[in-house]
Amino acid sequence: MLRCWWLAGLLLACAAAEPHCHQQLRHLQDSAGIAARLPPRLEGRWVSTGCEVRPGPEFLTRSYLFYTNRLFKALQFYYWDPSCRDPSYSLVIKGKLRLRQASWITRGATEADYHLHKVGIVFHSQRAMREVASRINQTSGRGCEGFLPPGRSWAPGALYEVLSARTERDCTAALGFAMHELGLLRVERHLQPLLQPQQSGSRLVEELYLGDIHTDWGERLHYRPTGYQRPMQSALHHVHPCPACGIISRADEHHPPVLPARAALPMQLSGSWVSTHCEVRPAVLFLTRFFTFHGSNHTWEGHYYHYSDPLCRQPTFTIYASGHYTQGIPSSKVRGGTELAFKVTQARVTPMDQVTVVMLNSSEPGSCGLEGSWSAGVEQDITPTNGCAALGIKLPHTEYELFKTEQDSQERSLLYIGERPTDGSSPDSPDKRPTSYQAPLIQCAAASEEFSNYISLKYVGRKDANGIEALKPLPVAFLLFIALLFLRWD
């Protein structure tokens, strides 16, 4: 009995010592109790959880209402500022949505067709009215000339029709407006533990993922999404606390939401940051990310864990990259953002399934590691071959990035890194610098707690092509080993 209590104490002590970043990564691989329903149930109101940034940049919040008869009413509120406190104009979008079948391209998603009945715009200032009217008058199609005569005074609350299916008038092109996001949908459900110490149990959280917006403004009007935007949440079943959720759900086109003021945070990259959920990129890439930044010498390390499924349970390959970065400067194009340049000088790849192994072993000699030497779970350095052509990795190379840090409603530090170009290219020149952000990373270790061990979520104790141990065993595997030893002693 004494031995069992000693063992239990050892297990608890070791589990407590497991770094928080390890815990978060394993939590993601366990899918965090996420369930996705096919086909999704959309009925009800869905809202943004904060101020969103689209390529351009555009700052907005959204409130979408889906009815049981397949009709919908979507509100999009646009702002001048990245805190969504200074409204510019609101769009009222009405139409009908028909769910089709599970997507053949993006696993876990449902494809849909939509038809717009009408789109109206409400201006919230004379400046907004003047700028939008000028764009529509100059660039929209037939029937849109003179949409608003120059010099027309702003009328608060007036609704102007910019699209009508009945009259076949469409003046939305000048706004860069399209609802192709409705062409790809996914609804996820999970339980959020109650945060108050005196409470127990959990509450339901529902998230709606809609199709991504192309990073190239010229492509967005005809782009069909293969990835997702930042998710909206059910107005009834959202995370708590969420100050923005209630404000946005109560808003309408005449009373746009004004989000609470937030203190500007200085850019503090030092420490370790990890994904908050399984992420989806265009061209059907599922991944989680883990970064460590060393502020003392401006070096960084990044781990990209790629998967073949939308819950990040089936690993395909992992990339480790490192290099250095420049001192950040405030962005002149995206208010609230910081511009940096990242130099990637080293990289290693670990194939995690047989399909990837075959692909890498079939690559051109000298283009991706040692020819014909790849095997599952074995890491290999691709720096000597200047990257890996099969995976689109070139070494060395520089990327021009956009970063932003903020705190969420629970005062946890979040890091937003620039959105990758939709066409799969690299932001390798200043003119390709992002103007929007990927899903946020959460800080899992402060600067004093940084660690750079390569974390494998699947394979342990393997050797790389040079005979060096590449992947470290997880603490849980070690604990199970000790437990088995004690069982044998009994």
Image (spheres, rainbow, N blue to C red):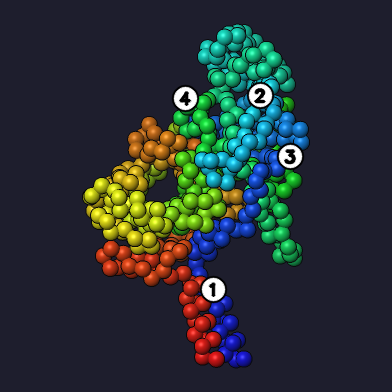
Q: Residue at x 70, y 38 (%)?
A: 248
Q: Give the Cα distance between marks 4 and 3.
A: 33 Å
Residue depicted at x 38% and y 66%: 471
Task: Say which amino acid is labelled 3.
Answer: Glu
Camera-nearest residue between 5 and 19: 5
330 left or right, relative to 80: left
Tag 1–tag 2 contact (CB < 8 Å): no
Q: Which residue is mark 4?
A: 218
Answer above or below: position of 220 versus 341. Answer: above
Q: CA distance from mark 2 to mark 3?
A: 18 Å
Q: Could you tell which of marks 1 and 4 lies nearer the N-terminus? A: 1
What is the distance, in whole Å, between disc 1 and disc 3 at their CAs?
42 Å
From the viewer's perspective, is the residue at label 2 or at label 4 nearer?
Answer: 2
Q: Is residue 99 above or below residue 394?
A: above
SS of the residue under disc 2: strand
- Residue that label 1 marks: 15
Does the rendering let one see residue 391?
A: yes
The image shows residue 436, relative to residue 95, as above or below, that is below
Q: Which residue is mark 3?
A: 43
